[in-house]
């Protein structure tokens, strides 16, 4: 854990929090009130809101989070991070003594099985939407909002030229509402930041290629929040992806693990269990099942409703399959995720079966 924690007070302005977030290149900032932990400023929740950071107090945007203890294991901490959906959690022993982030855990994964470290990074990375340098920042913001993601790659003629994260989008709320667009008759025409080009906001990416391994990804993510993977398509790998992958593989006794269900009601839990059970029974008739990892996340609250995102990782001898879905009805999202995963498995299984038939035909001809 990090012991020298950067914090902010509840009565300070959001603009002060933004300055600290930029200075220390972090995405979450603990809020302390009279030396006691009072919540977290999560950048992911703030940048999508239309607020004036110079007039809004931190207390208006801070959210409550679970906490860790200094005696917890790294494995317990990783599971707590995945269950919470946050990138970092406070470590509290009567008072806050540190903070632990996904990136910090990346530095503690040197004892992971060599077989896991040698796997292709493509088995961990997930496909993603991307933008071009000439696209506007508003498009990036929409992708983040609707896909529940925090980073968007920038691609130019097949090359990864940049990435935009939440810290880059602070400018949208910092009073930099306009940028110079050009000169006409000596006057400067202004335009809204969201209409400005992506190239004005992106930062340099960490790029991994198809021959990179999980070990390469872990090394990169110890110093970066994401890595862009190029192996025939554009993918992204984050610390959360690595943790989900490793925890999923390590569940030897129970091949199904679901995180993020702690606060859900019995109806959704029962429906999720039924969807998973049906999927396992159907797939088990065709292929061996190594593990199924599901991550449920809630975000973008609107009135009494919340949007749900569910990601699935399915380990088989044919390789890793990944699927995701999002929407307002959690039961429908769960079923769509399972349907997407099933379709992906069936397509690959069909190709494998066709290849075996073709080989058998050729063998008989010989």
Image (spheres, grey):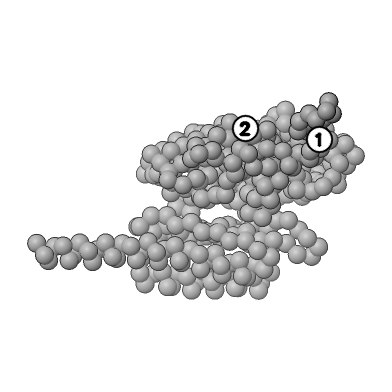
What x and y, as percent, mark residue 133? 61, 38
- In this image, 116 relative to 186: left or right? left
What x and y, as percent, mark residue 362? 16, 62
What x and y, as percent, mark residue 115? 37, 44
Q: Determine whether the residue tagged by mark 2 lies in a helix, strand or loop.
A: loop
- In this image, 99 relative to 104: left or right? right
Residue closer to the observer: 228 or 124? 228
Q: Residues within 10 Å of mark 1 (few under 14, many from 20)?
A: few
Residue at the image point whose x is 68% and y is 34% from the top: 201
Image height check: is 47 above or below 291? Answer: above
Mark 1 and mark 2: span between their CA atoms? 23 Å
- In this image, 328 relative to 186: left or right? left
- Residue 183 in view here: yes
- What is the quadrant of the C terminus in the image? bottom left
Quadrant of residue 200 within the rendered picture: top right
Q: Residues within 10 Å of mark 2 (few under 14, many from 20)?
A: some
Q: Residue furthest front?
A: 185
Q: Residue furthest top?
A: 186
Image height check: is 340 above or below 239? Answer: below
Image height check: is 221 above or below 288? Answer: above
Residue closer to the observer: 357 or 6? 357
- What is the quadrant of the N terminus in the image? top right
Q: Write down the residue under mark 2.
A: 203
Q: Write down the residue under mark 1.
A: 190
Residue closer to the observer: 236 or 117? 236
- Residue 93 in view here: no
């Amino acid at each position: 854990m990090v012991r020298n924690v950067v914090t902010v007070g509840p009565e300070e302005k959001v603009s002060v929090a933004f300055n600290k977030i930029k200075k220390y290149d972090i995405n979450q900032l603990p809020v302390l009130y009279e030396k006691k932990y009072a919540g977290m400023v999560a950048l992911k929740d703030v940048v999508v809101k239309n607020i004036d950071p110079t007039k809004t107090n931190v207390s208006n945007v801070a959210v409550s989070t679970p906490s860790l203890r200094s005696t917890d294991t790294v494995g317990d901490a990783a599971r707590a991070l995945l269950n919470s959906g946050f990138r970092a959690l406070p470590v509290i022993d009567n008072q806050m003594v540190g903070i632990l982030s996904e990136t910090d855990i990346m530095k503690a994964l040197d004892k992971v099985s060599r077989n896991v470290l040698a796997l292709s990074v493509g088995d961990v990375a997930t496909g993603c939407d991307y933008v071009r340098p000439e696209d506007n920042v508003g498009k990036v913001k929409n992708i983040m909002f609707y896909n529940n993601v925090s980073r968007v790659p920038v691609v130019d003629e097949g090359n990864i030229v940049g990435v935009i994260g939440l810290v880059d989008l602070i400018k949208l709320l910092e009073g930099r509402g306009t940028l110079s667009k050009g000169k006409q008759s000596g006057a400067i025409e202004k335009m809204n930041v969201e209409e400005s080009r992506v190239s004005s906001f992106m930062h340099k990416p960490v790029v991994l290629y198809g021959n990179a391994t999980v070990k390469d990804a872990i090394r990169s993510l110890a110093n970066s929040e994401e890595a862009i993977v190029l192996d025939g398509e554009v993918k992204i790998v984050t610390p959360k992806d690595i943790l989900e992958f490793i925890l999923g593989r390590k569940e030897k006794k129970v091949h199904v693990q679901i995180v993020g269900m702690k606060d859900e009601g019995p109806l959704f839990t029962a429906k999720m269990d039924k969807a998973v059970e049906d999927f396992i029974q159907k797939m088990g008739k065709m292929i061996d099942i190594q593990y199924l990892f599901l991550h449920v996340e809630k975000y973008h609250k609107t009135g009494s409703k919340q949007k749900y995102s569910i990601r699935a990782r399915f380990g088989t001898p044919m390789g890793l399959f990944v699927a995701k879905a999002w929407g307002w009805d959690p039961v429908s999202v769960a079923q769509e995720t399972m349907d997407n995963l099933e379709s992906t498995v069936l397509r690959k299984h069909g190709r494998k079966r066709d290849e075996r038939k073709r080989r058998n035909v050729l063998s008989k001809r010989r």
